Amino acid sequence: MGVGAVRPALGLVGAGSLARALVDGWLAAGWTPGQLWVTNRSDGERLRQMGDAGLRATRDRSELLAAVDVVVLLCKPDAAKEALGQLAAHWQPRHLLLSCLAGVPTAFLEQGLCVPEPRVVRAMPNIAAAVRGSATAFTPGRHARPADLEVAATLLGAMGDAWPVAEEAMDAVTAVAGSGPAYVFRFLEALERAALAVGLPGELARPLALRTVEGAARLAWHDPRPPAELRAAVSSPGGTTLAGLTALDEGGLDGMVREAVARARARGAEMGKRWAGAAPSERPPQS
């Protein structure tokens, strides 16, 4: 299976929000709808919508696996056992499993496939994949080959930036990058409401907040100075920016962000222990 300019056919198992974001990202990166296969255990409407968009939508796992080399696991984590069991019946040595399930370790994925030496890569993209802006990390399973990591890097890098990490870091990655867009959206909500509260009209408050956050992030990405220096550059003594920053500091912004990331990481670790302790024939309780 080639990488680089070659775009392999992909089989998506799951049709939720992240699946749709990945589809949008891969289409924007040059995949054609016919190269993207999708299946889902329920909700025929989602499959119908993807089929209407030109994707190869099917409920037949054997048909999907016959057509693709890379299977992207995007179901809910509590459906992992069922999905893996359905895939195992048709799994071939050529197949690579790219799992995007939060908290589900590679060891469980390998056991769940019930085939000799399954090739697995675990990844954590985020919903910004839809606009090719995802921050993604990935880690190999025991039987993944160097070529599999190249394929994963190509697929994930087509939707933003992707970094290889040790599996022990995946819960922290999920807490920062996987959940991070929600933190930013929450800040945008607050900034928009604050704009309305100081008298800006609604048709201006939202785009002003959006463009401000986008522009600041873009500058921080391209400017070599650390965020603290960039912040200082726009914080004149006695000025308006410093007055606003003082309010954020008094409100405990650093502590709130640390706590948000710590809780998300702890939840990921809890999920990982639950799955790591489950035999392939067991299904952990839903939460």
Image: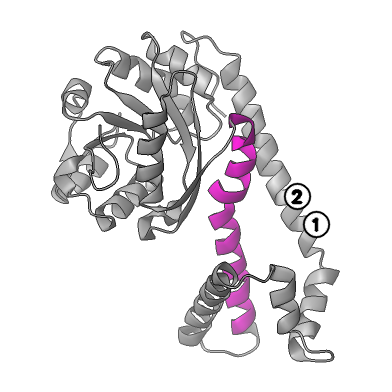
Q: Is residue 91 left or right of residue 98?
A: left
Residue 54 placed where, x, y %? Answer: 14, 48
Whether residue 246 appears in magenta in the rendering, the answer is no
* Residue 193 drawn above or below residue 82: below
Image height of 97 relative to 15, above or below:
above
| Residue holding disc 1 | 255
Residue at 24%, 15% (x, y): give it.
Answer: 90
Magenta-colored span: 167-196
Proximity of marks 1 and 2: CB atoms separated by less than 8 Å:
yes
Q: Nearer the viewer, residue 157 or 282?
A: 157
- Magenta includes 187? yes
Main secondary-structure element of the magenta-colored stretch: helix
**Which of the 4 image quadrants contains residue 173?**
top right
| Crowdedness near tag 2: few (<14), some (14–19) or many (≥20) residues, C-alpha within 10 Å | few
Kindly state the secondary structure of the residue where label 2 is placed: helix
Residue at the image position 52 percent from the left and 9 percent from the top: 279
Q: Position of residue 69 (x, y in %)?
A: 25, 28
Query: Mark 2 highlights which residue?
Result: 259
Taking the image as shown, residue 168 lies to the left or right of residue 280, namely: right
Number of residue marks: 2
**Residue found at x 46% / y 45%:** 125
The kind of residue on which mark 2 rests is Glu
Residue 277 position, x and y percent, is 61, 14
Task: Say which of 258 and 196 sits in front.
Answer: 258
